[in-house]
Amino acid sequence: MKKKDPTIEKVKAELLDSFDEELELELDDERVGDDGAIEPGSAERKRYFKELFRLQRELVKLQDWVVHEKLKVVVIFEGRDAAGKGGVIKRITQRLNPRVCRVAALPAPNERERTQWYFQRYAAHLPAGGEIVLFDRSWYNRAGVERVMGFCTEDEVEEFFRSCPEFERMLVRSGIKLVKYWFSITDEEQNFRFSMRIRDPLKQWKLSPMDLESRRRWEAYTKAKEAMLERTHIPEAPWWVVEADDKKRARLNCISHLLAQFPYKEVERTDIVLPERVHNPDYIRGPVPDDMYVPDLYDET
């Protein structure tokens, strides 16, 4: 029997994961059963889907509980480029109400924002009661990319390290539940994921010049990360490290851990009754001009 090339198998797994991203949008629990509805695929993939959907059902319960209790939740996702932050955020939000759970992914600050108190533009995205905000990168940009790329001075970094713990303690005292995740990947895994993105025209947009430069400065990012974790790991808002070389395991582990941070309970829902539609005998539907219709280019499937 011919021995499998581990590199080829890893590339296949990466491509399969991209396929799964789209498949997850279409599948529901009832379709992942013993009939093999998600084939082609392995038993491992099947177990992954079943557990993912189970966790997503729990996320819906958490969402309802947050709304019912008028809680304020902030979850921070940090990590190197291509560490998988976006993937887990996508799985968390996939089946939640975007009015309750939203993502804050801020661009680089503009000229006005550069003159503000550093935390000011982030504070504008904090949740009100009954809301969950997921920060896809956060105020920790100052301790990471800004420091490594020279976008701030060392004095500004030092001021950040003095202010950040106090800022987060203030958030916690105000009633915000703050959870912080660092997604950890190896040098070899980031190199592999960047190489896959370069070869995939649907994912090349994910690679910015800053991402490429970050690859060159791997060691500088490591030193910055170590300082950040050491100086901002506080009892009120500790860091949690997610081992993320295996994307699927990282997603499941992170979501499971996030759920465990809350003593949520299932909120009872009132029965929904669909009302009878009102029929008016004098109502006549007006015609729609043919040129307003979207062209029907595809046969029925």
Image (spheres, rainbow, N blue to C red):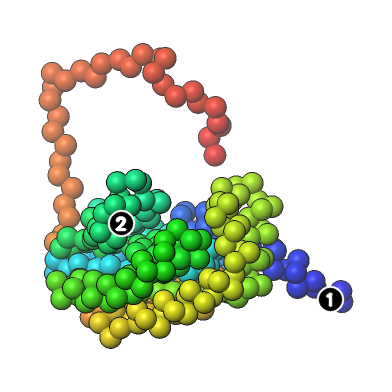
Residue tagged 2: 102
Q: Is residue 146 visible?
A: yes
Q: Residue at x 48, y 69 (%)?
A: 79
Q: Residue at x 63, y 73 (%)?
A: 187
Q: Position of residue 9 (x, y in %)?
A: 73, 68
> Label 2 vs label 1: CA separation?
46 Å
Q: Residue at x 46, y 55 (%)?
A: 25
Q: Is residue 242 visible?
A: no
Front-lying residue, 160 or 33 = 160
Residue tagged 1: 3
Q: Position of residue 117 (x, y in %)?
A: 25, 59
Front-lying residue, 227 or 252 = 227
User: Identity of the amino acid at label 2?
Assistant: Arg
Q: Residue at x 29, y 46 (%)?
A: 112
Q: Position of residue 61 (x, y in %)?
A: 26, 69
Front-lying residue, 11 or 20 = 11
Left or right of residue 296, residue 160 in this image: left
